Amino acid sequence: MEYGAIKRQVLELLDQYTIAGEEISPAYNHQSDDIHRVPNLINQALVDIRTGVLPERAVCQVGDSQSDADSQDGTNLGGVWIMHTLPGDFWRPRSGGVRKLDGQNRPAPFNQYQLIGKKSVLTPPGRYLIEYDRYPEQLPANPNDHYNLDEDPEVIQAACLYAAAMLAAREDETLYSALYNAYESRLTRMIPAPAAEVRIVQDVYAF
């Protein structure tokens, strides 16, 4: 969604976008100050949502097919371990999310790895798929109206409610409470439902 549409949503929630159908000037009622705060408030909400309520999955591949040479994206530490750099949006690995690729690109569960902080992972030589939860994209400090934020609509709408609530908090406690309650209700509806996990049964016992 373009930032211009996000900004308009926030102002409409504050009832600060039009008067009698005419668009309000940014100089009216400190609107320009509110607009200046919108990107940072949207960013706060995006991080809250994506790290607390609705994590977003991503997958990266590290390593190459050379078992004894330096990895193309990593540093060989003597042939036993290779250190790979993780993507910049890496937040945390998914449970069971590391898989080793064989010569035919078939992934198999793998647990002989070690995370080094938030930036690197150690593995034996080989190729690996790493499934992880990612940090959301962040708006720049002064985005133009055509800046496109690649985010799901329900997440953006929740972030707009948060931004509007924070802007209302200074002057209208009733409006703040209404907007923040709507934000929390939206978060509750966004929590994923429990899902069944399929596993291969190793041993079967007859009774």
Image (spheres, rainbow, N blue to C red):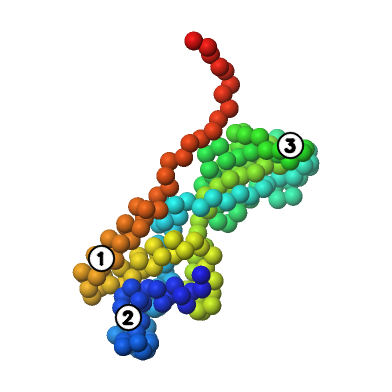
Relative depth, front residue between 186 and 69: 186
Q: Position of residue 127 (x, y in %)?
A: 71, 42
Residue at (24% x, 65% y) in the render? 177
Q: Give the CA distance from mark 2 to mark 3.
A: 58 Å
Q: Give the CA distance from mark 1 to mark 2.
A: 16 Å
Q: Is residue 79 in view? A: no
Q: Secondary structure at mark 1?
A: helix
Q: Secondary structure at mark 2?
A: loop
Q: Earlier in the sequence, mark 2 or mark 3?
A: 2
Q: Answer above or below: position of 167 versus 192.
A: below
The residue pinned by badge 3 equals: 102
Q: Position of residue 112 (x, y in %)?
A: 62, 33
The three-letter code of the residue at mark 1 reads Ala
Q: Answer above or below: position of 23 versus 89.
A: below
Q: Answer above or below: position of 138 versus 195.
A: below
Asked if marks 1 and 3 touch (Cβ < 8 Å), the reply is no
Residue at (54% x, 71% y) in the render? 148
The residue pinned by badge 1 equals: 178
Q: Residues within 10 Å of mark 1 (few under 14, many from 20)?
A: few
Determine which quarter of the picture holds residue 36: bottom left
Q: Earlier in the sequence, mark 1 or mark 2?
A: 2
Residue at (65% x, 44% y) in the render? 129
Relative depth, front residue between 16 and 22: 22
The residue pinned by badge 2 equals: 16
The three-letter code of the residue at mark 3 reads Asp
Q: Give the CA distance from mark 1 to mark 3.
A: 54 Å
Q: Mark 1 or 3, which is nearer the eye? A: 1
Q: Is residue 26 in view? A: yes
Q: Which mark is residue 76?
A: none
Q: Position of residue 103 (x, y in %)?
A: 77, 37
The three-letter code of the residue at mark 2 reads Gln
Q: Earlier in the sequence, mark 1 or mark 3?
A: 3
